[in-house]
Each structure stands twice: as C-alpha cells, then as structure tokens.
Amino acid sequence: MKVLAATNNAGKLKELRRILERMGHTVTSPRELGLDLDPEETGTTFAENARIKAEAFCRASGLPTVADDSGLCVEALGGAPGVYSARYCGRHGDDAANNRKLLENLAAVPEGNRAAKFVSAVCVLLPGGACHIFTGECPGRIGFAEQGTNGFGYDPLFIPDWVGLPDGATSPNAEGRTYAQLADGEKDAISHRGRAMAAMAKALPELLGGTGL
C-alpha cells in the first residue's frame, strides 16, 4: 500500500519510512508531494494530535495517511514535557534547547528518581474516513548528559530499559545505552513508535479488508 507519512520532521520521517517499508508499504512524504502543511497541534493528548495531523495530510493528499504524535513523560516532572515535548523550550523543534531545558530541570534529581517513558500514538486515516489509533510506550530513564548520534529529539538523553535483538527478542539494557546509541533494529524493536506501529501492522489487514487499498 502507498501511504503518506504525515510529518515534516526529518528524523521522524526517516524512522516512519524505515518501519513502514519493512512492513512492505511504499512511503511518500509531504515534501515529495509538494505539500506545505503545518497543522496546529491543539490536542491535549498524543492521540488527538496524531489525528489532527492525519486528517490534514490525508485531506490534502487523498492517500492513506500515517501520522504519529509522541513525546517524553518524566515522572519527576509530573509527566512533562508530554504533548509539549517538541516545543518544551518555547520554540518548536529546537532539539538542542529542549534537551538543555530537560537537563536543567532535572539537575537536582538523583539517578534513582529519573524514570521516564516515551509514548507514541499512531493514527492511520483512510481516504474514506476510517480512522484507527494505536499506542506504544517504552519505559526508561533520563541520563545526565547527551550520548550518541543515531537519533533525534530527546534520544541522546533517554536510556530505555530494554534493547532489541536481531531475532526480534529483547534484552535488558545492561550497558545503559541511550536511544541515540542503539542501531536502528535495536531501537525499532523496543521503541514507543516501533511498538505502536507493530500493533498497527497486526491490525491493518483486517482494517483494510474491503477497502480496495
């Protein structure tokens, strides 16, 4: 199936494309379609924001659309930055500033109290209006300094509890590597987005039944 990955974030697009293509789908992006859209994310939940994005891009493209809204929830900060993860510093998409603010706000928090989780809501919207939302979470903790370069956003600070193995199994993250220090396969097998999209992959054949897509 040809699907539109509804994001203008280069890092997220790379990850969505990688996961969707592994599932056998053909993926296109807003830029490749000449779409210049930046829908306002006014929802109060990840699911609401994912749907807002999916509806805007599906309407503009006429293609089955996959949109993700995700973020980091830190226990010591009462669940912040949450749905405001991309604009935690006050500007949208400034990863470096967001990471600095997170470290500053956790400066006095000891290692044992730095638990966090990444949460993802993936919305699949079909041109006929059918909408399905899948969620995934990845538990872990926040490190004291950025480590790794294979990622984006808060990836260099987030240390997941588990890592993926080549056979699809998982293993405890004994080395304490961040998302940004994991290989693509190690991350996709345990990541919040990978888990949401794995749930999507299981449900998609039945959801598409009779649609002709």
Image (tube, rainbow, N blue to C red):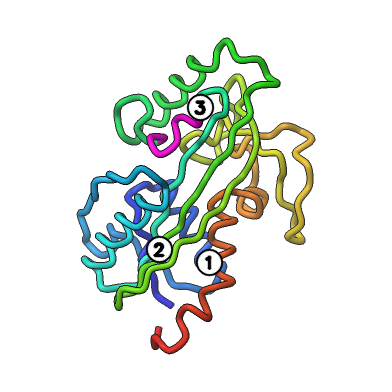
Task: Give 57 or 29, whichever is nearer the viewer.
Answer: 57
Amino acid type at circle 3 is Gly
> Are the residues flagged by discs 1 and 2 in contact, CB closer than 8 Å?
yes
**Magenta residue check for 75:** no
Disc with the residue nearer the chain's start (2 vs 3): 2
Q: Is residue 44 above or below residue 199?
A: above
The percent position of residue 169, horizontal first and vertical second, equals 76, 57
Closer to the eye: label 2 or 3: 3
Alpha carbon distance from label 1 to label 3: 29 Å
Q: Residue 208, located in which quarter of the rendered image? A: bottom left
113 left or right, relative to 99: right
Disc with the residue nearer the chain's start (1 vs 2): 2
The percent position of residue 95, horizontal first and vertical second, equals 41, 31
Screen quadrant of the C terminus: bottom left
Q: Is residue 90 above or below residue 207?
A: above
Range drawn in magenta: 79-85
The percent position of residue 84, horizontal first and vertical second, equals 38, 35
Closer to the eye: label 1 or 3: 3
Amino acid type at circle 2 is Val
The residue sitting at 75% across, 51% down in the picture is: 170
The residue sitting at 57% across, 55% down in the picture is: 194
74 left or right, relative to 208: right
The residue sitting at 30% across, 26% down in the picture is: 90
Alpha carbon distance from label 1 to label 2: 10 Å
Residue corresponding to mark 3: 78
The residue sitting at 60% across, 27% down in the picture is: 142
Label annotation for residue 66: 2
Alpha carbon distance from label 2 to label 3: 29 Å
Mark 3: secondary structure: loop
The percent position of residue 69, horizontal first and vertical second, equals 41, 49
Residue corresponding to mark 1: 200
Amino acid type at circle 1 is Met
